[in-house]
Amino acid sequence: LLAPDGTVAATVFAEMSALAARTGAINLGQGFPDVDGPSWVRRAAVDAIAPDAESGANQYPPGPGVPTLLDAVAAHQDRHYGIRLDPATQVLVTTGATEALAATVLALAGPGDDVVTLEPFYDAYAACIALAGARHLTVPLVRDPARPGAPLRLDLDALRAAVTDRTRIVLVNTPHNPTGTVLTRPELEAVADAARRHDAIVLTDEVYEHLVFDDAVHVPVATLPGMAERTLTVSSVGKSWSLTGWKVGWVTGPAELLTAVRTVKQFLTYVSGAPFQPAVARALGDDTFPRELAASLAARRDLLCEGLDAAGFAVSRPRGTYFVVADGSPLGFDDGADLCRRLPALAGVVGVPMSAFCTPGSPTAVALRSSVRFTFVKKEPVLREAVRRLAALR
Ligand code: PMP
Ligand code: GLN
């Protein structure tokens, strides 16, 4: 977790956002929206701490989360997916999905255990697995040579080889950051099958659950046959309600597993901040904002994909999230990290190299070496300007 000189390594997102700030380039690196979530949800947060408010939002809330939010998470899972949860024992509120993931990996995996993730993977996964002292194995998402431009798909043979009796956790992420792949039901059934066969737990990061496009359907792992009893599901308010700075998340699943996670959470943050929790409970009752966001993101996805394509990149069209992967090799750029460092000067745009989401030197890192992730969760005029600038690369 340390940089070569022994200092704390900045995450790639912080590094690339700093590069954008320093150079004045358009920041299509770190994934955060440039329009805030619903005003009525923000108003509910203001009300919670208003000087004349009666609520007790200024002192420690209950450890597992405020009851209205526990109820709202359970109601959300039931309404969208038919997943029935006991709010008192099967829901835990966390400080963003990040804490839910960390507490779960620390609670359930340790030295001698394998944790299997997809690759590329969200950078926090590798760090949590290292903190737990477990071994990190990966299953690649691969390009289909027969379908150029299609989203990456899961390598099922590699999945069956990676998951063994040593596997404690299979950590999946759908819709998937950074590729925008939405795992299909057969792919998720293969994950479920491997987990059942080797008695592993599935930890599923579904923070982009509502941000799917076209005919893609988000399938929660916990809805697959026999999986509710061995699946811990993580999500948060950040992406679907455009409130990434609020850092309110949750993890749901069987009571015994959740007890272990809650025990660890107690010593990470004790409890999560009180003021935003009632407002997030209100947000979770609303399906309109996420639905409209997904529709507008699909249009912005089209705009950026077409622009990258016209600029000469080979684009894998995403079916979810707010990220697109573009390969710079047709333009003569063989190293995505180098391209990202030069992109502000070359085109006034910032992206994130795909190598940041890979184990250094792995086959996936090699396959994605010349690729860059760009976000399209920016206003349309911003994307139009980015596309205009990227055309200069040709
Ligand atoms: N998982 C994935 C896949 C993400 O992209 C993010 C983005 N921030 C997170 C987890 C963390 O979510 P949060 O901000 O709620 O901690
Ligand atoms: N999830 C966002 C991304 O992938 C932001 C993550 C972060 O800044 N840690 O860009």
Image (spheres, rainbow, N blue to C red):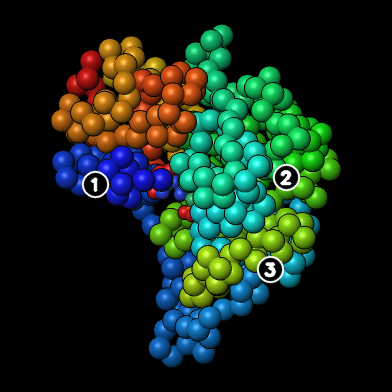
Under tag 3, what secondary structure? Answer: helix
Looking at the image, which is closer to me, 1 or 253?
Answer: 1
- Mark 2–mark 3 Cα distance, whole angstroms, equals 25 Å
Q: Nearer the viewer, mark 1 or mark 2?
A: 2
Could you tell which of marks 1 and 3 lies nearer the N-terminus? 1
Q: Quadrant of residue 332?
A: top left
Residue position for label 3: 71
- Mark 1–mark 3 Cα distance, whole angstroms, equals 39 Å
Q: Looking at the image, which residue sits at the far top? A: 146
Mark 1 is surrounded, within 10 Å at the Cα level, by few (under 14), some (14 to 19) or many (20 or more) other residues, namely some
Check disc 3 and give the amino acid type: Asp
- Mark 1–mark 2 Cα distance, whole angstroms, equals 37 Å
What label sits on residue 201 in the rendered view?
Answer: 2
Residue position for label 1: 18
> x and y percent of residue 60 in the render?
53, 80
Check disc 2 and give the amino acid type: Ile
> x and y percent of residue 297 in the render?
45, 40
Q: Quadrant of the C terminus?
A: top left
Q: Is 183 displayed left or right of 283 in the figure?
A: right
* Numbered circles on residues, count: 3
Q: Quadrant of the N terminus?
A: top left
- Looking at the image, which residue is at 71% across and 64% down? 259
In the rendered image of this protein, does residue 346 appear above or below residue 36?
above
Mark 3 is surrounded, within 10 Å at the Cα level, by few (under 14), some (14 to 19) or many (20 or more) other residues, namely some
- Looking at the image, which residue is at 56% across and 68% down? 267
Check disc 1 and give the amino acid type: Ala
Confirm if mark 1 falls within 8 A of ligand 2: no
